[in-house]
Amino acid sequence: MALDEIDLARATDVLVREELERAAGFATPLLRHRFLSRRMALRQILGGELGIEPAHVTLGLSARGKPIVLDRPGVFFNVSHSGALGLLALSAHSEIGVDVETVREVPRWTEIVREFFDETERELLLRTDRSVGTFLSYWTRKEAVAKATGLGLNLPLSSFAVSNFSGDEASIVMIRGVKGTPRKWHVRDLMSGPDHMAALASSHACAEIIWKEFPVHGE
Ligand SMILES: CC(C)(COP(=O)(O)OP(=O)(O)OC[C@H]1O[C@@H](n2cnc3c(N)ncnc32)[C@H](O)[C@@H]1OP(=O)(O)O)[C@@H](O)C(=O)NCCC(=O)NCCS
């Protein structure tokens, strides 16, 4: 079955009780539908890569709340979605985080920069390059790092800078002053517009990492 042919009617065969309960808790049918679509795609991709049935992928959460495969402690993955696009990254060697954002207007993005970004980034974004595109590229890099650590947006986004990237190679990002989290991350851009920005953060430089796009269905 191709990813764009995901049959949501099969959700009850593939998803576990907790996932169906979480789906039932969404406030609108659209949100419920989008969650089911994401989970079916996630299980299908992970199952395909791990060589097991999608329904048998044992999804759970780390102590920090990051989704993991419970019975494959050496497998690392992370997912992001924005609008109709989903992105999943998978590695057998390296802790990873991904983020994708649709290129769009972001109301009050300068306030986010002022309040949450590092000083160098503030200087660049508020004085030199006041473009929402640059903001989104910094945001995806920052969220990819935050998700790689497992802390998500509980990681202070001002504790590291992502403004000094060069070329297509991964750049090194150092987190300052956060205890219990590896400091050094390798970050690269996966998409740089025109429709989406996306970034990937990994704990190891040369780790073999695959990433796949998948559609997130609406109504
Ligand atoms: C994880 C987080 C960064 C997601 O941000 P987002 O822009 O809404 O969503 P994205 O599409 O990029 O990523 C969502 C996916 O991230 C993954 N994810 C969830 N928690 C995660 C964590 N702690 N670390 C890494 N990845 C996580 C999930 O696979 C999720 O997909 P799902 O919703 O289908 O389960 C954000 O929700 C967060 O920081 N959560 C942890 C802190 C928290 O719970 N705060 C609540 C308010 S105090």
Image (cartoon, rainbow, N blue to C red):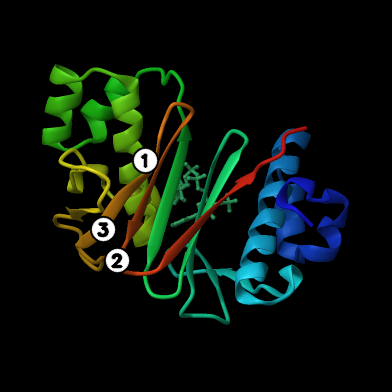
Report helix, strand or loop for mark 2: loop
Q: Position of residue 134 (x, y in %)?
A: 29, 27
Label 2 packing within 10 angstroms: few (<14), some (14-19), many (20+): many
Image point 77% across, 57% down: which residue? Answer: 20
Residue 85, image quadrant: top right
| Mark 1 lies within 8 Å of ligand 1 (Cβ measured) | no
Name which of mark 2 and mark 1 comes first in the sequence.
1
Number of numbered discs overlaid on the protein picture: 3
Instruction: Identify the residue position indicated by label 1 in the image.
Output: 140
Are discs 2 and 3 less than 8 Å apart at CB?
yes
Say whether residue 142 is left or right of residue 4.
left
In the image, residue 51 above or below residue 186: below
Report helix, strand or loop for mark 3: strand
115 and 6: which one is in front?
A: 6
Say whether residue 141 is left or right of residue 123.
right
The amino acid marked with disc number 1 is: Thr
Q: Which mark is residue 203?
A: 2
24 and 146: which one is in front?
A: 146
How far apart marks 3 and 1 lie (CA) works out to 14 Å
Q: Which mark is residue 186?
A: 3
In the image, residue 123 above or below residue 56: above
Q: Position of residue 101 (x, y in %)?
A: 46, 35
The amino acid marked with disc number 3 is: His
